[in-house]
Amino acid sequence: MRSRILSWAAVLTGTLTFVGGGAIAAPHAWTDPVVQADATDFYIPPAPLPGGAPGNILRAEPTQVALSAPGQPGVIPARATRLMYLSTDAQDAMTAVVGTYLDPIVPWTGPGERPLIAYAGGTKGQGDQCAPSKLLSQIVQFEPPADVIFEYDLVAIFTLLARGMAVMVTDYHGLGTPAMHDYLNRKAQAHSVLDSARAVLQLPGNGLAPNAPVILYGYSQGGMASGGAAELHPSYAPDLNVRGAYVGGPVVDDQYFIGYNDGRADIAPTYAWILNGMVANYPSVGPVLDAELNDTGKAILNESAGKCAVPMGMAQQYQHTSQWTASGLPLAAVIDQSPTLKAVFDEQRLGGLTPDMPVLISSAQNDEGAPFAPIHGVASSWCSRGVPVQLDSNAEIPSMSGLVGTHVMAFFPALAASQQWVTDRLAGAPAPSNCGGLP
């Protein structure tokens, strides 16, 4: 029973935390934790990167999806190809990202050409072993003594494939590859998602039409990524035939997210992942955080950078961010008082740009992780710009925290509703909108 609960609770929570053994590392100097892999590894980009446009494929190879036997489709009804493709990071510099293309073996029975789902996954962590393309081949990643992550996105991916939709799952920038994964970075995530679709459309034998309809799709971290991709599509990837965006349970404001959840042990590692990504992306951030964080805070960032889930780690032990800072102020207050940090955090907020496609946003009003208030604000902002937005707010799920929380439970009704919404967009049905009376 416990294993079943853990498996389902992991679905799209963003983190799976096991309580177990393992020594707590003592605070130590803050250093760059990124470890270079062997040069022959698929995940090591060529150096220097070749010229070309975002979405260009650098390398590709067949790969095996978990639960399938060699040469057989098995449980997952698709043929899998692992790709490394060009994308751009938060500073618009060229980078390399890995993802997995799943070409369904069942026919597409809907209207028009087979669609491509540009799938943005939920939180896996910041260690290279957490990359979705690695988890798809093994489902569970375990590192002693008890660091465990499930490939919980298989639930949604399977149902999309079963409908005959092709699915491209990006790893995001820095997962698997040597760069630091910039967790909850608006631009880098959006670029990875949009360029993943571009890469698939360049893959020979992809089973898709050259101008195949594309749907942006994600929940939790993936909700933020699909929302960011929807906002940047008109300027960054207008060549893609994007027909709609599903933005499920999104984090839409990093600073609000940290302040809202401060003190929750299960969420605490995510603050470190956010800060690690900002240090890697914005040169001005490192010196500021070096002055603002105490030795404990610096050690937490170090430890968290290599983890998928952190059992009994420092972030959980020091779950209040006031314990991380030299001033004793919580991180949200430190951000407010630093113009440098405030500017970088403001850059991550959704709602300032205009998607050019219909959007479905789903959120539980009692979501304990990805709070509803700023999500409602994003919906209002997009509505004010003329975007057809349907905000589905689930008020029936009570406020629950812990391993099986509201954020997890809200995923299941949203899954069925979102896929029907996708099917309707592909059929050309008028996009529903409740902009005139948002819940």
Image (tube, rainbow, N blue to C red):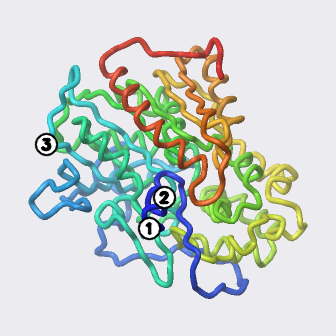
The label on residue 3 is 1
Is residue 39 shown above or below 264?
below
Q: In screen coordinates, is 330 left or right of 142?
A: right
Viewer-nearest of labels 1 and 3? 1
At label 3, counting other C-alpha atoms closer than 10 Å, the crowd grade (few under 14, some 14-19, many 20 or more) is few
Image coords of residue 247 (percent x, y): 51, 35
**Quadrant in which the C terminus appears:** top right
Say which residue appears at 52% left-offset and 41% top-offset: 223
Mark 2: which amino acid?
Ala
Answer with the quarter of the image where residue 267 lies.
bottom right
Q: Residue furthest front?
A: 1
Q: In screen coordinates, is 419 left or right of 308?
A: left
Kindly tell me whether residue 124 is visible in this rendering: yes
Say which residue appears at 20% left-offset and 44% top-offset: 103
Of pointers 2 and 1, the one earlier in the residue sequence:
1
Is residue 371 shown above or below 8?
above
Viewer-nearest of labels 2 and 1? 1
At label 1, counting other C-alpha atoms closer than 10 Å, the crowd grade (few under 14, some 14-19, many 20 or more) is few
C-alpha distance separating marks 2 and 1: 10 Å
Q: In screen coordinates, is 100 left or right of 310?
A: left
Of pointers 1 and 3, the one earlier in the residue sequence:
1
Pointer 2 residue: 10
Pointer 3 residue: 205
At label 2, counting other C-alpha atoms closer than 10 Å, the crowd grade (few under 14, some 14-19, many 20 or more) is many
| Of residues 387 and 30, the one drawn nearer to the viewer in this rendering | 387
Is residue 147 shown above or below 435?
below
C-alpha distance separating marks 3 and 2: 34 Å
